[in-house]
Image (cartoon, rainbow, N blue to C red):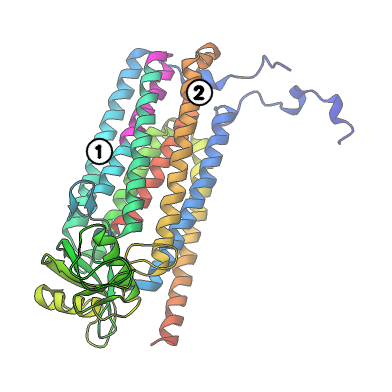
Amino acid sequence: MAGHSAQLDAKTLWGGKESPFQTSYGKLMMWFFLVSDALTFSGLLIAYGFTRHDALDSWPIGEETFNSMPFLGHGYPLLYVALMTFILIVSSVTMVLAVEAGHRMDRKGVTKWMIATIIGGFFFLGSQAWEWSHFIHGSEFGKIELADGSVAIVKGHFGELESFQVIEAGKKHKVGAVIKEDLMHQFQHAAEKGHLEDGKIHLADGSVAKINKAADHDMKLIIKKDGNTYKVGGKEITGKEAEKLYYEALYAGEENRVIYGANMKQNEYGPQQYAQFFFFITGFHGFHVFSGVIINIIILLGVLSGTYHKRGHYEMVEKTGLYWHFVDLVWVFVFTFFYLL
Amino acid sequence: MERDDLIEYSLHGHHDEATGKSIRQKIYKVTLLLTVITVIEVFIGASIKQSSDWWTTVKVIFILLTLLKAGYIVMVFMHLGDERRYLRNVILIPYFIFVLYLIFIALYEGTAVGAAWDKMFP
């Protein structure tokens, strides 16, 4: 056959004049790519479901983990993620409006809606950056191993650290000196290393200081791993009892009793795989959003220079639009399976 | 080689202002619907705890609402609903075959793994 192919012209090779799909090659290929990409995301979310199914009760709950808003603090379960979802839906709408304007050969309309879409995309990326940063840095309380061996996450309002008053001199600080800077960072570092004891902190230079701290409010412990006394799903531990248990453990002077935030090895929210799935799924989606924004910018440049107008149709906008809607579609599923369930 | 007998399908998308207006109205309606569904989801998620007896029902509601949202995005925003039936089938049928199989195998294996864990660490 190979020897004959030189004599065949395109007409003989492709006898059918009409495509059964009545659509252009580019659009069809974009759809095929989206199907394969959708399968990738399905695989990731199903793997997440599988892992979660194994872990059951110790798995973190979305509304417990994601309850913060920029500038407002804690106590807003899922609102921020809902806002992100809304931003992405709106930018999907502006994209479909750009496609519609393209079908009317309305170049100004396409430009306007493409710019709106790109701005929406940047807003979403910024929101995700904030969410990641918040997830990595964690809460002020962290996750703590109580005296009976159970592990609890802590909710409530952390009383502000006011100062450290040095009572034993070290290399840098003299007795009686009052430290007022970088308190939270030093406090959490000392807590992880087990350098907190009976309301005192061992600082990095070898000095010992008394901790002056405002009272906590509404503290609540949620058990995530069974101990001798406290069990997962048992009665809620609140108020004075919670404070006593928490500070007993925090001031025990033992290493690794408390974990703040998240990294690839451990996290304060739940099993190790939880943070890994968070980073991978939202990261992979964020990468799609990022590349979507870049592609949108490139297409916008094409619109501005009149390339598509000269071509007689704005199908390139439609194709990049398909990709952009797909990114929104994936987020709808991530929102449900990662945050809501 | 230029082909003059091929149909330029890219040009089929063109429509006039009147059609555009009705399309835009449909887009706005779907936007409102998607927003309302998201608000309902967040409201349910924030008000019903996972320890509640209703949680299984809530889970099913969440999944149904998500599929509804996804359906509107794919059929209206990605206008797969306006494409030819063959194209729709070529995209949706293979996808659903694979994903349903994947969900089935994950649940089946997941139950087995869970049982094995229980046996090892009772």
Left or right of A59: which side holds A231? left
Q: Amino acid at mark 1?
A: Leu
Q: Residue at x 28, y 54 (%)?
A: B62
Picture coordinates of residue A212 (x, y %)?
15, 67
Left or right of B6: which side holds A326? left
Q: Residues within 10 Å of mark 2 (few under 14, many from 20)?
A: many
Q: Residue at x 10, y 73 (%)?
A: A239
**Mark 1, chain letter?**
B
Task: Say yes or no: labels 1 and 2 on the same chain.
Answer: no
Q: Main secondary structure of the magenta part?
A: helix
Q: Are marks 1 and 2 in contact (CB under 8 Å)?
A: no
In which quarter of the view is residue B31 placed? top left
Left or right of A125: which side holds A247? left
Q: Amino acid at mark 2?
A: Glu
Nearer to us of marks 1 and 2 is: 2
Name the quarter where the C terminus of chain A is drawn: bottom left
Picture coordinates of residue A174 (x, y %)?
24, 68
In which quarter of the view is residue A194 placed? bottom left
Residue located farthest toward the right when viewing the structure as drawn:
A3
Residue carrying label 1? B33
Q: Is A302 situated above or below A193?
A: above
Q: Residue at x 53, y 15 (%)?
A: A307
Left or right of A151: which side holds A54? right
Picture coordinates of residue A82 (x, y %)?
26, 46
Residue carrying label 2? A315
Q: Which residues are magenta?
A: A90-108
Name the quarter where the N terminus of chain A is drawn: top right
The answer to if A272 sits in the magenta stretch is no
